[in-house]
Image: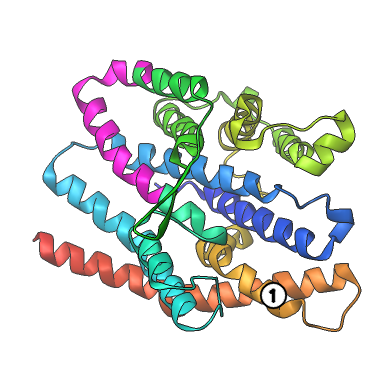
Amino acid sequence: MEIRKLNSLRGLAALIVAVSHYSNNTQFLSGFFGTGAGQFGVMLFFILSGFLMSYLYMNQPFNKAMVYQYGVARIARVIPLFLLVVFLSYSSANLLYNIPNIQHLMAHLLFLFGTSVLWTIPVEIHFYLLFILLWWFYQKWEGRLYLLLVAIVALLIFLGLPRINTEWLGMPIQFRIFEALPYFLTGLVLGQVYRHWSAPKQWQSGAYLFSLLFIVLLFPQIFQAITGVKHGLWKDVGVLLVVGSVFFSLVFLVPDDHSFLTNSIGDFLGKISYSLYLLHEPVLRGVKQLPIENTWLLLVIFLSLSVLVAALSYFLFENPARRMIRHWGVKKNV
């Protein structure tokens, strides 16, 4: 069953990242939407990912056929466009991103490192692998999974939600799964809640859409302007609680048929969100060369071109490649 609200949330997450990068590069609205604001789009992406993995797979039998099906679906969803972007970046002198040598190329291909927005893809892959273990654990000891998740998050918080940066054989290595994992696991728990519980109608209201304002208030520049202090982004448990609560409010408490989250534009942006996320930065570099000083006008041009490029990427490459891999995977599994 498709949860259409998630399409709009996925599109919104990609737009948050894109507008944040635009704000960083143009000082749009004095840069209030930049300097880390895009990280909140990524947080939403990670909660969404955990939610969907849990909702789609956790209650399925854990066997070779299902794990194979899961693996094919994840590869088809993430890998083709990522590889295309990585190889084009390496072979075309920074046309897309800076992958300057074979060591950096191998670090990307082994999911050990990601430059610019590509950093999230290794993190996503690491979670996909971990999810297989959590799936197995849930099938064996269903009730104890939540105790395990609490223990994992508590340990990570105790360790300071570490980010590991090192180098091996000349390859840059960065593990950010530890600071991102609480977001994936929040989504995982909410996915199970969604499968087994729905909010009574009298609890639901479109007013919960205003919870999105809490994310805007957490944008680092805005938060510091209001409070006079900085929060810790990924290392701040309070940020996790707020973003998780906003996600809960939107998915559980906003009516399923509310037009703001359930509409054709949201469906479209959700479809192209991955291409939009991976390709908006090269578009931004091109748009910055235009002789236009009005940052509002430039924003409209940037977002329009980014959506156009993302749509072309989705319909001409991303979706055909995904369907081909899934079709090939089904044939191999017959």
Residue at 40 percent across and 29 percent down: it is 192
What x and y, as percent, mark residue 170? 39, 60
Number of numbered markers: 1
41 relative to 66 in the view: left or right: right
Q: Is residue 20 above or below residue 143?
A: below
- In the rendered image, residue 129 lying in the magenta stretch gets the answer yes
Task: Provide residue 219's location: percent of width, then percent of height.
Answer: 75, 42
Asked where in the image residue 265 lies, by quadrant, the reply is bottom right
Relative to residue 133, is residue 17 drawn left or right?
A: right
> Is residue 85 depicted above or below 52 in this figure?
below
Residue 261 inside the magenta-drawn segment? no
Q: Position of residue 64 (x, y in %)?
A: 12, 45
Judging by the rendered image, the residue that carries numbered circle 1 is: 285
- The amino acid type found where label 1 is placed reads Arg
Residue 296 horizontal side relative to residue 200, left or right: right
Q: For the residue labelled by badge 1, is the local secondary structure a helix, a strand or a loop? A: helix
Residue drawn at (60%, 36%) of the image: 234
Left or right? Give the position of 317 relative to 204. Answer: left
Per the rendered image, the range of residues in magenta is 124-147
Could you tell me which residue is drawn at 43 percent across and 28 percent down?
189
Residue 5's spot in the image, x, y percent? 56, 47
Query: Where 179 sits versus 287, above or below?
Result: above
Among all residues in the image, which is located at the extreme left?
334
Give me the residue at 46% from left, 25% from top: 156
Residue 307 seen in the figure: no
> Which is the main secondary structure of the residues drawn in magenta?
helix
